Amino acid sequence: MSAPGAASLYHRLPPPPAPGFEQERTDAPSPRRHDAAQRPVVRPGLRLIWTMTGLYLLTELALNARLLDVAGTLTTAAEIHDVERFGWMMSGIALWLFVWGVWMLPRGLARRWPRATWIRTGAASLVLCLTPVYYGEQALIDHLTDNAGGDLRRAAVVMRLLTDSLSKTREDGARLLAISGLDLAGDLLARPEGKTFLALLPFLGASVPCLEDKALKVLDSLLRAHFKSSYGNPDSVYNERFRASVARLAEMYRAYVGLENKFLRRRGSPGSQSRFRAAGRALLARAGVHDSELPFDLDWQKFLASEPIQKAWRRMLSPGGAVALAADQRLAIDISPDALERAYEVRWVEIERRALRSAAKEFEIGGSQEQRSSDAARALFVPPIALFFSLLGALAHIFKFANYSSQFFAWPAPLRLAAVWTLFAGLALSPLALPNDISRSTVFAYFERTLTQRHGPLTGPALAGGTKWVVQAQAYAYPANDFVRRRLFWDWRFALPS
C-alpha cells in the first residue's frame, strides 16, 4: 500500500521514454535556440536608416566627381554655380539624416507613430534642416566674395587667366603657360590630381607675394597666346564671319540704291531729299548705327568706305562684344584672314591689358571690373571649400554607413567600433602617405611654404596640409566616384533648375 500522496506524485512525473529512444535532456539548449542566440538583434528602423545613408553616400561620391570635373577644367561660372547649389542642398540633407537617425526615428518607433505622422514629420524636418543650411552656405560664399578687397579680387582675376592658360594648348600641343618645377608633359592635368591642382591654383596663387607684378611682366605675350587659342582658325573665322558681313552689306547697298532710285529721281519735288535722308537713317538703324546719315551718289567702294557703313561693319564683326574691333579700325573688302585676326588681336589685348592694369578699386563692388572680379573671387573660394567638405562629408557618411552595417553582425560592441574606426582612420589618413606627381613637385612645395608663411603658425600649416590632403585624396577617390556617377547616376551633371 502506498503512502498518502504517492499516487498524485507518481502522476506528476514524466512518462518513461519509449523503447529505443533516449529522453531529451532539458538542460541542453536546442540547435534552434543556439542559432537564435548567435543572431544579432536588429533594432527597429536600422534597415531604413542604413538604406537612406547608403543612398546619400552614393550621391555624395558622384557629386564629388562632377565637382572636380567642373572646377578642374575650362568651364563657365554658371556650371560651377549649378554644382555648388546642389552641394548646398546635399549639406542640408546630411543634417536631416543626422536628425532623423538620432532623434526622429527612435522617438517615432517608441511612440508608434502612424504613417501620416511619419510623412508630416519627415517633410517638415527636411524643410527645417534644408532651408537654413542651403541659404547659410550661400550667404557664406557671398560674404567671402563681397568682402574680398580689391587687391585680392584683382589677384583672383590674374590667377583665373593663368589657370586658363595652363589648361589651353597651342597648335603644336605645348601649353600656353609653363611653370618651372612642374612637368606638364603628357596627360598630367587631365588626371585627377592635375584637375585638383587646377581647381586649387587660384587659391594657392593668391597667397604668392607680388603675384601681379610677376604676371604682368609676361602679360602681353600671355594675352596674345590666350587670344590665338580662343580665336580659332583664321580662315574659318573669315569665311563664317567676314563673308557673312559682306553679304549683309551688299543687301544694304541694294536697299540704298533702291532709295536713290525712289526719291532722287524726282529731285525737284519738295521734301524728296529729306525723305531720302530719313529712309537712310532707318536703314542704318536696322544695322545698329544711329544718328548718322548716308550721303548721295555712292558707288559700292565709296559706300563701304563711308563712316556710317564702317560703324555698321565693325558692329557686324563684333558679335556680342566678346571680341570687338577698335573704333578706328578701317575695314576693306580685300582684307586677308590673317589681317582680320591681327585686327581682333590688337583690340582684345589692348582691352585686357587695360582692364588687368586697372586700379584695385575698379575690382571692388561698384567698380568697372566688378562682375569679372566677382566671378574670379568665387572661383577662388568655392573649389577649395567644396572639394574639402565634399571629401570630408563622404568620409563621415562612410563611417556612418559602416557603423550601421556592423550592427547587422553579432559582434561585441568594442570589436564592432574598433573595426569601424580602423576603416575610417585608414581612409582618412592614407592619402597623406600616397604622394603623386603634383604633390611631389617643387612648385607645390613652394605653394605650401607660401601658405604657411602668409597665414601664420596655426592657420598656415592647416591650410597647407588640407590642400595636400585634397590633392592626394582625389587621385584615388575620383576614379571610384566617377564610376558611381557614370554608371549609377547615368552621367548626371547635378544641375538644379534655376
Image (spheres, grey):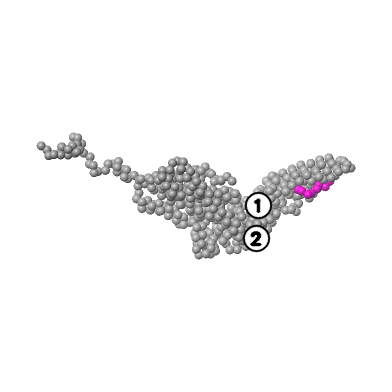
What amino acid is labelled 2 in the image?
A: Lys
Q: Secondary structure at mark 1?
A: helix
Left or right, residue 172 beside residue 55 = right
Q: Quadrant of residue 300?
A: top right
- Where's residue 483, x and y in %? 49, 46
292 magenta-colored:
yes
Can residue 177 be seen from the camera position used here? no
Q: Residue at x 47, y 45 (%)?
A: 121
Magenta part of the protein: which range? 289-297
Q: Quadrant of residue 271?
A: top right
Can residue 263 be seen from the camera position used here? yes
Q: Residue at x 48, y 48 (%)?
A: 96
Q: Residue furthest top?
A: 19
Residue matched to label 2? 361
What amino acid is labelled 1 in the image?
A: Lys
Residue matched to label 1? 228
